[in-house]
Image: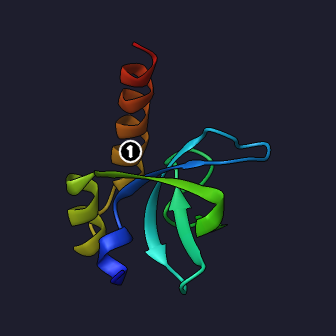
Amino acid sequence: MQDNDLIGKIAYSKAGRDKDKGYIIIGKIDDNYVLVADGKKKTINKPKRKRLKHLNLTCEVANEIKDSLLSDERDIDIKIKSFLILKAIVKEV
């Protein structure tokens, strides 16, 4: 999988205190680790490092956020936060 294939994907934590929490992958460290953000506690400037095996990857990609990440736009945290909130609302219904 290429680096850009993971960026922008929606992933959910499998276990731990953040179980079932939604994240967006914002970077790839190596074959085992990625950087994720949720727009609130874990921002673009201070992302969370997660093992890929600890994430449930979805096939859905947030294309607008991916484009923003690749072009180094500002206010990406607001986009991530609102996208994940909307996703949680839709998931509940």
| Kind of residue indicated by mark 1 | Ile
3, above or below 42, in the image: below
In screen coordinates, is 81 left or right of 65? right
The foreground one among 38 and 73 is 38
Q: Report the residue marked by disc 1.
A: 78
Q: Residue at x 28, y 56 (%)?
A: 65
Q: Quadrant of the C terminus?
A: top left
Residue 31: x, y in percent?
54, 84
Outermost residue toward the bottom in this view: 30
**Quarter of the image that includes the N terminus:** bottom left
Q: Residue, x 74% and y 47% (percent of image)?
A: 15
Percent across and percent down for residue 67 are 20, 64
Q: Quadrant of residue 85?
A: top left
**Circle 1 residues within 10 Å: few <14, some 14–19, many ≥20:** few
Q: Position of residue 18 (x, y in %)?
A: 71, 43
Element type at marker 1? helix
At 66% from the left edge and 48% from the top edge, which residue is drawn? 14
